[in-house]
Image (cartoon, rainbow, N blue to C red):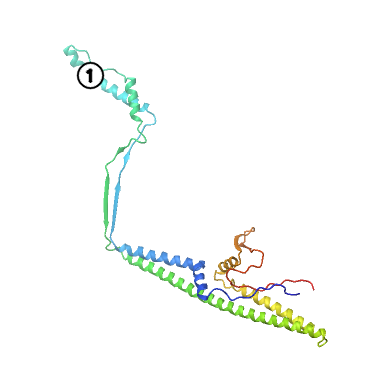
Amino acid sequence: MQLTTTLDLVPFGLALDSVLALAEQTNADLTALRARTHAAVVDVRRARGRYTPTLQLNAGLSGYTYQYTNSNVLVNASQQEWQQEYTICLASDSAERAANGYPPSCGGLLLTPAQASQIRAHNRVSPFNFTSAPYAISATLTVPIFDGLGREQAVERAEAVEDDARYDTRARELQLTADITTAYHTLTTALRAAQLQQVNAAKARDELLLAEQRYKVGASSLLDVTDARASAARAHRCQSDAAGGAARRLAANGSGIGLVLGRQITEAHGGTLVLSNRTDGHGCAALIRLPLGNAAPSEPLISGTRAVTRPR
């Protein structure tokens, strides 16, 4: 086994302050706690507003309309009313006209078709022919005086909720700062360890080359070459493990910035990072696409060592 492809280790490209600021912006728990604090502040303002007088203004403009679904009801009612008036007319007017020698003038007993049509036409008023009601306006002024200490209790309760929210938010900020700081220094230490392993691997390669040259001229034995090869393989393996461990520590702190940093690293190498739901419904899947070739990243963030095997 021999390492044929390597990527140089570079220092982490973000300062601690930048990582902390990024974590505060992207951490879901901290964002939720800050939203809860803001809601608590608004609730305190609303509770304190109960001490101020309240002026309520009401204004209204209304109207009404109605229509019979069966117009014959109006026609029949008008016909009955017409017959009653006709009977009264005959009883009062006929005697007077008979005494003076004139015929009765009460008209006909039934409504004419024109009168019935007019009654039906007057019934077709809905829905646009409204009868307006008078315009109404009112004002109510409420002055809070005493409500059994209800306002004081509401304000104290709202302020207690606000204090709890602020304390929870601050505690999460301190915890996040401590986690990020610890992870950052751990990552820095891991990178330094990987660089030391890189130096050790280079030294092991030189020792192997020297042992092979000494073996060719008879200055060393085959056992020395075998030991040098084992030491070189062990050094390369330690180098790969150290580089991979440094990269894995980015997402091992649980601070919620692993995805953001992973996207930045992928985009720095000209690739894309896409998240999607898994087909089995458990969790999500991350798909990373990187371009072919040996193009250098636009911004050096972190890299490792890649091992490729080939038969000897």
In the rendered structure, the answer to whether residue 241 lies left or right of residue 123 reads: right
Where, by quadrant of the figure, is residue 234 drawn? bottom right
Give the residue at the far top of this rendering: 101
Is 57 on the left-hand or right-hand side of 16? left
Residue sitting farthest toward the front:
217
Q: Quadrant of the N terminus?
A: bottom right
Between 223 and 93, the residue placed more toward the observer is 223
Identity of the residue drawn at 32% across and 38% down: 64
| Within-10-Å neighbours for mark 1: few <14, some 14–19, many 20+ | few
**Which quadrant of the figure has residue 210?**
bottom right
Question: Residue under circle 1?
Answer: 91
Q: Is residue 268 above or below residue 136?
A: below
Q: Nearer the viewer, residue 143 or 175?
A: 175
Q: Is residue 246 left or right of residue 206?
A: left
The residue under label 1 is which amino acid type? Ala
Residue visible at 29% across and 23% down in the picture: 82
Residue at coordinates 34% horizontally, 25% vertically from top-left? Answer: 75
Residue 213 picture location, percent across and down: 79, 83
Taking the image as shown, residue 154 lies to the left or right of residue 6, namely left
Along the viewing direction, whichever of 203 and 260 lies nearer the viewer: 203
Q: Secondary structure at mark 1?
A: helix
Q: Quadrant of residue 44?
A: bottom left
User: Residue 25: x percent and y percent?
Assistant: 49, 68
Q: Residue at x 29, y 50 (%)?
A: 58
